[in-house]
Image (cartoon, rainbow, N blue to C red):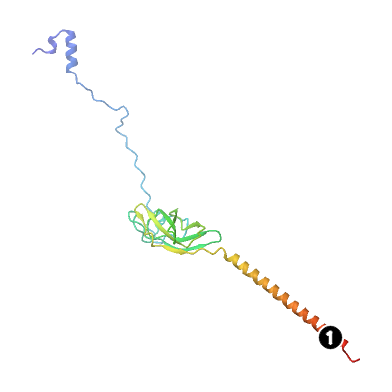
Amino acid sequence: MASCTDFPFPALIFCLLLVRPSQASEVDPDYNPDYTPPSSPPKTQHPFSGKRCDYSSCREGQVACNVLADSTGCLCPGFTLQNVAPEAPSLMSVSWNGSDVVALWCAPNSYVTGYTVTVRQTLTGKEDRLTLGQDKRSGVLGHIDHVSEVCVVAVNDAGQSPETASCLPYEPRDSSLPLKAGLIGGALGLLMLVLLGVLLWRRQRQRKQQSGISMQDAEEGPR
């Protein structure tokens, strides 16, 4: 077999191109063998303080206890995990505050993302729902005109607490009571005026009768 040197010059060039490596190794121009990627700063670990967190399950608008524990190292009560449906909250009262019906409750020892308050009319079964955030401990329910059952449930990504585990009945105030009291008071006042008028009339009549008798006796006196 003839070598590349046995061919004429143009063929020699072609032969050299054939025996040249088909692909040269490529080098990234931005490559720096001394480059070291930056390491992320270590997460700050707060030492365990052993003290209970400044947390009340009935206080509204406060930071969640697990957030306090992570930031200060304080101790939270035993909370259920995030992948477990929450326990039922404690519904403390449902009352009229002068302008609206307000429900008050305390949070359960569970991971909670929100609350749902349900007002269910006893006779018709009609329901109205109010959804609130996890930091809420009260709900303004407006005017409730019928006897109803008020329930509150805790909610998280795993589910919700039992619907009937935290409920209280509510009986609306009778708005006609002030009117009835006013009518009764007015009737009693009118009756007293009538009785007083009758007594005055009878007394005046008795005086006239006595005056007439006296005049008659004077006329029939000794002659």
- The x, y position of residue 97, in whole percent, is 54, 61
Closer to the camera in the image, 52 or 201: 201
The quadrant in which residue 8 appears is: top left
Left or right position of 33 against 148: left
Is residue 66 depicted above or below 216 in this figure?
above
- Please state, as top left, top right, bottom left or bottom right, where the C terminus lies in the image: bottom right
Q: Measuring 18% from the left and 12% from the top, which residue is drawn there?
A: 14
Closer to the camera in the image, 194 or 155: 194
Q: Measuring 17% from the left and 10% from the top, which residue is drawn there?
A: 11
According to the picture, the residue beneath numbered tag 1 turns out to be: 214
- The x, y position of residue 135, in whole percent, is 45, 55
Closer to the camera in the image, 80 or 50: 80
The quadrant in which residue 188 appears is: bottom right
- The x, y position of residue 80, in whole percent, is 34, 58
Tell me the element at label 1. Answer: helix
Q: Measuring 67% from the left and 73% from the top, which residue is drawn there?
A: 191
- In the rendered image, the residue lying farthest to the top is 8
- In the rendered image, the residue lying farthest to the right is 223
- In the rendered image, the residue lying farthest to the left is 1
Q: Please rate how many residues cluster around mark 1, counting C-alpha atoms within 10 Å: few if below 14, some from 14 to 19, many from 20.
A: few
- Identified by mark 1, the residue type is Ser
